[in-house]
Image (tube, helix red, strand yellow):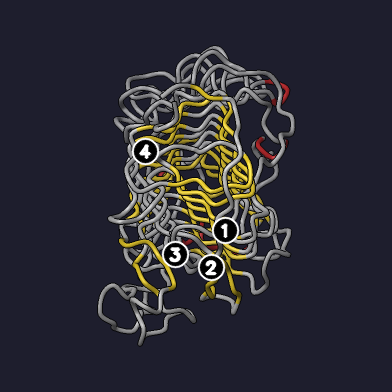
């Protein structure tokens, strides 16, 4: 493997059609299956102010196997919190950084004065996790400083070794929480699920005052987000939302498709152990006809016809439906989104689903920056295709469906309508697709060949699963990708199987 910057043309791939279960929409898919693995994140040195970056290129359809869309409801997981906090004027870090064994960051951080990304340390460092014996510290304008709250231990947060060299989009800056609903009155006991749920149901900006030590809030029932009000939740790097391996954490379900402007922002949060309970069983049919479920998407978060921003968050141990040709999204599942999902400086580790072990998208753009995907897994098998010769007497989702998922060990994007995938400064390692499925690291299929995929300043290694690249132009993406797209681009990146 070596860093690559050149592009070449590839042959077109034929397309096949399938019916999306949630809408009566026909979509063309190729070889759908996904998996995901765990990971952690550490901020690197800042690069200056934030500026917009293009959406990248897109994806296309046709090719190896079909696949349906993921849709349904989802759940979340917990994460640890680190010792020490990030200081700095105006940013997440400066001199002072997160301290303590197992702390959050060294000297520096991810958001510096003036909206930039400067700092010489990183967010999420140390072997103790996001909080340890140091704590989040208060400084001028920053999230941390000297002194700060302490927390013993915390879950491990691996370092994000990659860094995007291009300025981040304007939307990558955290939401200003100077005016917000406050959960808690300064003690752990004052921060309750019922209080948080009431605030989430209402929408708007939400922050926490639970004291100086890390706090875990047990989520006992899925919190339903308003679809007509922007919502931003800021955990201050001290709050973990825990689905207790029983419930999905948050659900946003708008009746329309790709029209809603409403945005949900999650920042400085850890979300763990979210879990969906699928109910729509696929009618019994002999293998290789599809098995499993048609629902149960989004272990931690499910979003339909909304827009999502995730900044400096950890998603760990979340689970969506574990088998089914069209379901998935272990941590996040977003479908029918006008503006898609923007993920910045976040860690996805140990999440799982039939497809899309960590993040799944259907007709939704995925723009991911400075993030780590590790040890996520797609648990389905056999991918997904429409083949009447193999399953002649059974129809599911309007098709003779064959295969039960397993595409996209870490990241999965499906659909069309010029929805692209951009990975910049992203580390995708040791994730896995399911048996006889594709895209151990990344799976993308653009049904109408209008979407493109760009991989910049990224490392994609040690992932397992089948692979292919079919584009109208651009280079093959190596053995961790399963891609049908309009075009592909590799810039300053290390991809397994690419020489």
Q: Residues within 10 Å of mark 1 (few under 14, many from 20)?
A: many
SS class of the residue under badge 3?
Answer: loop
Nearest to the observer: residue 434 or residue 350: 434
Instruction: Give the residue number, with chain letter if any, for mark 1.
Output: 61
In the picture, measured across the screen, residue 305 lies left or right of residue 477, that is: right
Q: Earlier in the sequence, mark 3 or mark 4?
A: 3
SS class of the residue under badge 1?
Answer: loop
Please identify the quarter of the rendering in which residue 464 is found.
top left
Whole-number angstrom distance, CA of label 4 to CA of label 2: 31 Å
Q: Earlier in the sequence, mark 2 or mark 3?
A: 2
Is disc 1 in contact with disc 2, using a CB cutoff of under 8 Å? yes
Q: Residues within 10 Å of mark 3 (few under 14, many from 20)?
A: many
- Nearest to the eye among marks 2 and 3: give it: 2
Relative to 326, does residue 374 appear above or below in the rendering?
A: above
Instruction: Give the residue number, with chain letter if any, for mark 2.
Output: 16
Whole-number angstrom distance, CA of label 3 to CA of label 4: 20 Å
Outermost residue to the bottom: 393
**Picture residue at 46% right of the left edge, 26% below the top:** 494
Whole-number angstrom distance, CA of label 1 to CA of label 3: 22 Å
Please identify the quarter of the rendering in which residue 130 is found.
top left
Whole-number angstrom distance, CA of label 2 to CA of label 3: 23 Å
For the N terminus, the quadrant is top left
**Picture residue at 33% right of the left edge, 47% below the top:** 465
Instruction: Give the residue number, with chain letter if any, for mark 4.
Output: 374
SS class of the residue under badge 4?
Answer: strand
Is disc 1 in contact with disc 3, using a CB cutoff of under 8 Å? no
The image's mark for residue 164 is none
């Amino acid at each position: 493997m070596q860093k690559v910057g050149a592009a070449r043309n590839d042959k077109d791939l034929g397309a096949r059609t399938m019916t999306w279960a949630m809408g009566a929409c026909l979509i063309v898919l190729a070889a759908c299956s996904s998996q995901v693995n765990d990971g952690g994140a550490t901020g690197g040195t800042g690069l200056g102010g934030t500026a917009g970056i293009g959406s990248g290129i897109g994806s296309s359809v046709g090719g190896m196997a079909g696949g349906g869309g993921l849709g349904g409801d989802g759940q979340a997981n917990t994460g640890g919190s680190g010792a020490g906090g990030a200081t700095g004027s105006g940013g997440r870090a400066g001199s002072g950084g997160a301290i303590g064994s197992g702390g959050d960051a060294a000297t520096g951080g991810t958001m510096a004065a003036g909206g930039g990304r400067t700092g010489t340390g990183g967010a999420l460092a140390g072997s103790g996790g996001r909080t340890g014996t140091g704590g989040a510290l208060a400084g001028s304008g920053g999230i941390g400083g000297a002194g700060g709250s302490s927390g013993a231990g915390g879950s491990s947060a691996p370092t994000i070794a990659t860094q995007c060299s291009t300025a981040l989009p304007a939307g990558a800056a955290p939401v200003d929480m100077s005016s917000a609903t406050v959960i808690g009155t300064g003690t752990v006991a004052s921060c309750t699920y019922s209080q948080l749920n009431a605030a989430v149901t209402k929408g708007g900006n939400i922050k926490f005052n639970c004291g100086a030590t890390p706090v875990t809030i047990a989520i006992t029932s899925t919190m339903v987000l308003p679809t007509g009000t922007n919502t931003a939740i800021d955990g201050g790097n001290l709050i973990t939302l825990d689905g207790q391996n029983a419930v999905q954490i948050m659900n946003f379900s708008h009746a329309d498709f790709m029209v809603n402007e409403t945005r949900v922002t999650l920042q400085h949060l850890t979300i763990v152990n979210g879990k969906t309970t699928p109910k729509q069983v696929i009618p019994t049919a002999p293998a290789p006809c599809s098995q499993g479920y048609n629902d149960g998407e989004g272990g931690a978060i499910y979003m339909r016809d909304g827009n999502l921003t995730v900044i400096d968050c950890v998603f760990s141990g979340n689970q969506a439906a574990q088998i089914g040709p069209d379901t998935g999204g272990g941590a996040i599942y977003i479908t029918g989104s006008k503006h898609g999902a923007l993920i910045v400086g976040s860690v996805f580790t140990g999440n799982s689903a039939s497809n899309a072990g960590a993040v799944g998208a259907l007709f939704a753009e995925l723009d991911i920056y400075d993030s780590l995907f590790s040890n996520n897994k797609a648990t389905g098998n056999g991918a997904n295709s429409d083949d009447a010769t193999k399953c002649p007497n059974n129809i599911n989702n309007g098709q003779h469906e064959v295969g039960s998922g397993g595409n996209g060990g870490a990241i999965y994007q499906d659909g069309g309508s010029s929805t692209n995938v951009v990975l910049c400064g992203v580390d995708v390692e040791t994730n896995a697709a399911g048996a006889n499925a594709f895209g151990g690291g990344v799976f993308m299929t653009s049904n109408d060949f209008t979407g493109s995929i760009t991989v910049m300043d990224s490392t994609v290694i040690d992932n397992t699963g089948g692979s292919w690249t079919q584009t109208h132009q651009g280079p093959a993406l190596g053995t961790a990708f399963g891609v049908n797209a309009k075009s592909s681009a590799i810039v300053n990146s290390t991809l397994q199987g690419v020489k």
